[in-house]
Image (cartoon, rainbow, N blue to C red):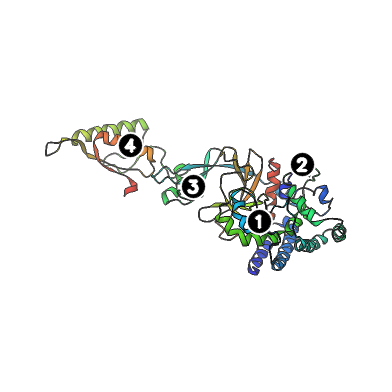
Amino acid sequence: MDVSRRGFLKISSAALMASGIGINLKPVAAHAQPLKIKYAKETTTICPYCAVGCGIIVSTRGGKVINTEGDPDHPVNRGSLCSKGGSIYQLSQNKNRLDKPLYRAPYSDKWEEKSWEWMIDKIARNVKKSRDKSFVFKNEKGQVVNRTDGIASVGSAAMDNEECFIYQKLLRGLGLVYIEHQARI
Amino acid sequence: MVQVLKDTLKTIDGYKNMNPHYEELLNILEEVLILREMYRRKVTGDIFNVEESLILKKIAGGLPLVDFPEGTFELEGPKEYFIALLKIAQKRDLNETDEIIRKLNAGEIDYGEMVRESFTLLQDEDASDESEEGVFDLLDFLVEESLRPALELLSEKYGDIITGAKWSEGYCPICGREPKMSELKGEGGSRFLFCGQCGFEWQFKRIKCPFCGNEDQQTLAYFTIEEEEKYRVDVCNVCNKYIKAVDFRKAEKEPNLDVEDIATLHLDILADEEGYE
C-alpha cells in the first residue's frame, strides 16, 4: 500500500528513521468496511434553450442524470443559470411529465389515452381542415401572401434551439404567421 | 482568529461525538491546532526569503515560491515548533518520542534534512517501499505541520498576488506540494484545491485531474457514499490518483479543511481499496 502522497497509511521511510509513532487506523477501517460507494461521472454540455449558450455540468450514474448545475469554469455563465436552465434536470427526470399522448374530444370533459399514430393522424387531419378553410392566397390589395390565419402556435418551453428551428420551418411552410414562443411571453 | 479556533474546536467536538472511531486522531488535531495558534503569533518574518520581484515570473513559469528540495533555510522557528509538537506524540509513545527529541537536540538527526526528505519523497514514490498498512504516521504529519505557521505567513502575504496571477497548476504555488483536499464553494460552485502544508487554497478547473492534468471526461469520475452528500472523491483513471472534495454549499458554514481531512480518512481507505493512490 503506497499512499505516501497523503502522508499516512504508511510508516515513514528509513531516512525519516524507523519511527513507532503511528496511530492505528483499524477503527476507521472497520467503519469504512461496510460503506457502499457509488460512482458517477461528470460531463459538460451547453444549455439547449436560448442563444446565450450557458455551460452546464451533468452528473450521471449508469446513464441516468442524477444532477445538473451551472459550470463554474464556463466563460459565459461562470456557474450561474437562469430559472429555466437551472431546472433542466427535469427535462430528463420528472415524474409529472406526460409520457403518453392524451386526447380530449370536442365538448368532452375528460382526457383519453391515444397512440402516437392515432394522434399524428388526427393532428394532420385537423391542420389540413383548418388550413383549407382559412388559407389566404391574396390579400385585399391583391398581393400574394399564401398565409394560414386559422392556426396559431404557442410553444414550447422545453424545445431546444434545433427543435425550434425545424418546428418553425414546418409552421412557415404551412403558412402560419401567428408563431410565438415561451421565451418571448 | 481565536473565535475561528473556538468554532473549529466545537466542530471537532461534534465530530468526536458522532464518530467515536476518529476520537484519537481528532484529539491530536485539537492539540495541534491550539499549539499552531500560539506559534503563529511567534512568526514575525519570512524565513524563506522569497524574492518579491520574482513572484510573478515564478507563478507564470509554474514554479512555487519556495524551493524546498534545493533551498536552504533558517529553520530554527519551525524546529522549535516541531519539538513542541513532538510533546503531543510523547503522550502516545513516550520512549520513542523521547529518543527522537534527544537525537534532535544532540544533532544526530538533522531537522532540515527531515524537511527536505518529506518534500523529495513526493517525487520518488519508490522510496516508500517499507510501508505498513493501516497506520496514520504521526511523525510525517508533525514534520509537515511544523512548517505550517511559517508558510501560512507567506500565503497571507502573497496569496492575493498569486490568485490575481491565475495560478492554474495542480500543485501548491507556495510550497509545491500536491493538494490534500478540494472544496466546491461560492455561488458558482468553483473548485478550490487546498494545500495541507501551507493552508493555501487556489481555484482549479472542476473537471480536470490536478495530478496529471487529464481533462478527458470519460476517464474522470467521482464516488460518494450514501448519506454523506457533503463529501465526494474525485478519481482519475489515467494516473489512478484521487482527491477528496467537500461541498458545504448547502450546509451554510465554512468547513475547516484540516478537520475535514482527518474526519474523512475512511474515504482515503475506500479510495485505496478501489486502487487509487
Task: Look at label 2 and name its amino acid.
Answer: Asp
Mark 3 — residue? A74
Residue A130: x and y in percent read: 22, 36
Give the Cα separation between the discs numbered 4 and 2: 62 Å
Q: Chain of mark 1?
A: B
Disc 1, SS: helix
Disc 2, SS: helix
Point out the image quarter for the C terminus of chain B.
Answer: top right
Give the Cα separation between the discs numbered 1 and 3: 28 Å
Task: Look at label 1 and name its amino acid.
Answer: Glu
Q: Is residue B207 above or below residue B194?
A: above
Mark 4 — residue? A167
Both marks 4 and 1 on one chain = no
Asked whether the beta carbons under mark 1 and mark 2 sit within 8 Å of each other, the answer is: no
Query: Which dot marks residue B126?
Result: 2
Query: Which dot marks residue B260?
Result: 1
Q: Chain of mark 4?
A: A
Disc 3, SS: loop
